[in-house]
Image: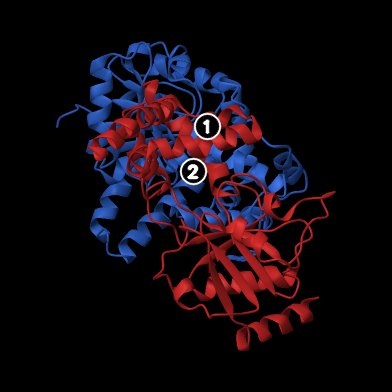
Chain colours: A red, B blue
C-alpha cells in the first residue's frame, strides 16, 4: 500500500493536473488565490468551488476515472452529496472547506473531509493539491462542524455566557486568554470582529446536528442574530428608496 | 506604589511555589519558602539557581544582582519563620483539607497584618479563606505555569475579602512586575474554566475518531493561530495532572464538558501520561516528538 501510494504521489508530482469547476461564490477561494490561478482547463483531479459545489458535482456524472474529486462544503456533510450506506461509503470524492470565521479572512487551513472507505490515494493527492498552493491540511471524518467549529463554538458560547454573568470584563477575559494561553485574540474581541450573528448561524447548526447544549447559541449571539433579522428589511427598504 | 509589603512567604515548594518565589525575589522582596519536606526545598533551590544561572547567561540579570536575589531567598521547614512575612502565598496540593490545615497553622504564627493568598486554580477562594481565620485578609492569586516566565495573575476576592486587602494584593502583584486581571471567585476562574473543557472536547474528537491528534492540533494552530494544539498541550501538562484539575473543576461545576473523557483514564492506566513517560497522544524520544 505504501509503495502504491508513493508511486501515485510521484505520478501526481510529475504529471497530474487539476481543474477548477466554479459553482457560485466560494467562501474558501478568491479568483486570485494560488490554487485557482494554478489550475488547468482539464485534469485528473477536479476541484469544485463555490456555494453550489454539491449541485455541480451531481452534474458531473460519473467521476470514477478521476484521481480525486474535491467538493467545497458549507455546513453540510459530504455524505449529503455522495450518499451513505452501512458506514462503508467512500470513493475518490472528498469534501473540503477552508476555515473562516464569519467576515474574517479565510485561514491558511483546509479541513479535508473523508469517509470511512475513501481511497487513500485520493486523500494523498487532495492533500498535495492544497499543500502545493501553500495551504495546511487537516484530515477529518465526515461530521458536522468538522474539527475547528466543533471545538471552538462551545468555547465561544461559554465565553459569551460568562461575560454576561460578570466573571470578568470583556477586556480582562480577552487579556487573560491572550496572556495565559498565547491566543492571538481573545474570544470576545474575535467574535465582535468576525460577527456574532455568524457565530449564531454556525453554532445553531451544530446544536441542531448534535442536540448538545454546549452548542446552543449564547444570549449575545441570539440578540445579534435577532437584530440582524430586524434591521435587514429596514436596510433593504432604505436601499430601494 | 507602596504596599507596605517587604517580606513574602511562599508555602509549598513544588513547581508553582518555586516559580512564585522566583518572581517575588527577582522583584526585590525578601522571600521565605516553607515546605515540610527538606528534599523538596533542596530541589526547588537547585531549580531556582539553574534558572538564575540561565538569566545571567542570557544577560537578563547581572551576576551581582543574582547573588543579591539568592541571598534574599531562603527555604525553611519551620512554619514559624513565616511570622516575618507581610503576605503568604500558599501553593500547596489542591485539596481543601490540606490548605485549611496549613492556613490554620499559619494563622497562629503570622501577625494580624499578614495577608494570605492562595494560588489555587480550581477551588473556591471563599471556601479556602473560611479555614484561614482571616477571611477579610485573604485573596486569590492564581499564577500561570511557569510562574517565573508568565506575567498573568488571576486575582479573585472572596466574599469576605476587604477592599483594602484586594487593593494591597493587586498593587503587590504589579510591584512584582506581573499583570493582574480581576476575576470573580468562580471555579477555574478564567483560564481553567475555558481551557479544561476545550481540551476535553479535543480528547473526545480523538475518541470519536473524528480526526487524528496531529490533524486536530494542526487545525487549531493553523486555523486559529494558537501556539500549541490541545493534544500537544495535554502531553506537555501530563494526562495525570489534567485528570486532577478536570475532576476538581467538574466537582465544582458539574459541567458535562469538564467531565474527564474515558480515554484519559485508559491512557493513564497504560502509562501514556504524555512527554514525561515518552508516550501520550504522540510518541516522544528524547526531546523529539513522533506522530506530529
Name the quadrant containing residue B11. top left
**Vertically, is B144 above or below B47?**
above
At mark 1, the secondary structure is: loop
Same-chain status of marks 2 and 1: yes
Tell which of B68 and B102 is nearer to you: B102
In this orientation, does residue A132 appear?
A: yes
Query: In the image, B206: left or right of B140?
Result: right
Tell which of B123 and A146 is nearer to you: A146
Query: In the image, A133: left or right of B82?
Result: right
At horizontal 29% and vertical 53% (from top left) the residue drawn is B67
The residue carrying mark 1 is: B36
How packed is label 1: few (under 14 Cα within 10 Å), some, or many (20 or more)? some
**Vertically, is A124 above or below B90?**
below
Query: In the image, B291: left or right of A194?
Result: right
Q: Position of residue B160 (x, y in %)?
A: 35, 10
Q: Distance between the Cα atoms at labels 2 and 1? A: 15 Å
In this orientation, does residue B143 appear?
A: no
Q: Position of residue A130 (x, y in %)?
A: 54, 70
Asked if marks 2 and 1 touch (Cβ < 8 Å), the reply is no
At mark 2, the secondary structure is: helix
The residue carrying mark 2 is: B15
Q: Chain of mark 1?
A: B
* Residue furthest out toward the front: A241
Q: Position of residue B5 (x, y in %)?
A: 23, 29
Q: Chain of mark 2?
A: B
Amino acid at each position: 500500500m505504501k509503495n502504491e501510494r508513493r508511486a501515485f504521489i510521484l505520478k501526481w508530482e510529475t504529471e497530474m493536473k487539476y481543474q477548477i469547476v466554479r459553482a457560485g461564490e466560494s467562501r474558501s477561494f478568491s479568483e486570485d488565490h494560488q490554487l485557482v490561478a494554478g489550475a488547468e482547463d482539464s485534469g485528473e483531479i477536479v476541484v469544485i468551488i463555490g456555494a453550489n459545489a454539491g449541485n455541480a458535482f451531481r452534474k458531473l456524472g460519473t467521476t470514477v476515472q478521476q484521481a480525486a474529486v474535491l467538493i467545497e462544503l458549507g455546513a453540510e456533510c459530504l455524505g449529503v452529496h455522495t450518499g451513505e450506506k452501512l458506514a462503508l461509503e467512500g470513493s475518490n470524492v472528498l469534501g473540503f472547506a477552508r476555515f473562516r470565521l464569519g467576515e474574517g479572512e479565510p485561514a491558511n487551513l483546509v479541513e479535508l473531509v473523508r469517509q470511512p472507505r475513501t481511497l487513500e490515494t485520493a486523500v494523498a493527492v487532495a492533500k498535495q493539491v492544497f499543500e502545493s498552493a501553500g495551504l495546511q491540511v487537516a484530515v477529518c471524518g465526515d461530521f458536522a462542524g468538522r474539527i475547528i467549529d466543533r471545538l471552538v463554538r462551545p468555547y465561544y458560547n461559554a465565553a459569551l455566557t460568562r461575560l454576561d454573568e460578570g466573571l470578568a470584563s470583556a477586556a480582562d477575559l480577552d487579556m487573560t486568554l491572550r496572556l495565559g494561553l498565547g491566543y492571538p485574540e481573545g474570544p470576545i474581541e474575535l467574535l465582535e470582529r468576525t460577527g456574532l450573528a455568524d457565530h449564531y448561524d454556525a453554532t445553531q447548526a451544530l446544536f441542531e446536528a448534535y442536540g448538545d447544549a454546549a452548542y446552543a447559541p449564547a444570549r449575545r449571539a441570539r440578540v445579534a442574530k435577532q437584530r440582524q433579522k430586524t434591521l435587514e428589511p429596514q436596510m433593504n427598504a432604505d436601499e430601494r428608496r | 506604589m507602596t504596599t507596605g509589603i517587604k517580606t513574602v512567604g511562599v508555602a509549598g515548594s513544588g513547581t508553582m511555589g518555586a516559580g512564585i518565589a522566583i518572581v517575588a525575589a527577582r522583584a526585590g522582596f525578601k522571600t521565605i519558602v516553607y515546605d515540610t519536606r527538606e528534599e523538596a526545598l533542596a530541589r526547588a533551590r537547585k531549580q531556582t539557581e539553574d534558572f538564575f544561572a540561565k538569566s545571567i547567561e542570557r544577560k537578563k540579570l547581572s551576576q551581582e544582582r543574582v547573588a543579591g536575589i539568592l541571598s534574599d531567598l531562603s527555604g525553611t521547614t519551620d512554619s514559624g519563620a513565616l511570622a516575618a512575612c507581610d503576605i503568604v502565598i500558599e501553593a500547596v496540593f489542591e485539596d481543601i483539607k490540606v490548605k485549611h490545615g496549613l492556613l490554620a497553622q499559619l494563622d497562629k504564627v503570622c501577625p494580624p497584618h499578614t495577608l494570605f493568598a492562595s494560588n489555587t486554580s480550581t477551588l473556591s477562594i471563599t471556601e479556602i479563606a473560611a479555614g484561614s481565620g482571616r477571611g477579610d485578609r485573604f485573596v486569590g492569586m492564581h499564577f500561570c505555569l511557569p510562574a517565573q516566565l508568565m506575567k498573568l495573575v488571576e486575582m479573585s476576592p472572596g466574599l469576605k475579602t476587604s477592599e483594602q486587602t484586594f487593593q494591597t494584593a493587586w498593587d503587590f502583584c504589579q510591584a512584582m512586575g506581573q499583570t493582574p486581571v480581576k476575576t470573580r471567585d468562580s471555579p477555574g476562574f478564567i483560564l481553567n474554566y475555558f481551557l479544561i473543557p476545550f481540551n476535553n472536547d479535543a480528547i473526545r474528537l480523538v475518541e470519536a475518531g473524528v480526526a487524528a491528534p496531529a490533524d486536530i492540533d494542526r487545525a487549531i494552530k493553523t486555523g486559529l493561530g494558537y501556539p500549541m494544539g490541545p493534544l500537544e498541550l495535554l502531553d506537555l501538562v501530563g494526562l495525570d495532572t489534567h485528570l486532577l484539575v478536570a475532576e476538581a473543576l467538574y466537582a465544582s461545576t458539574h459541567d458535562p464538558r469538564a467531565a474527564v473523557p474515558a480515554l484519559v483514564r485508559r491512557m493513564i492506566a497504560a502509562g501514556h501520561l504524555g512527554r514525561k513517560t515518552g508516550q501520550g497522544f504522540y510518541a516522544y524520544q528524547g526531546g523529539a516528538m513522533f506522530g506530529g
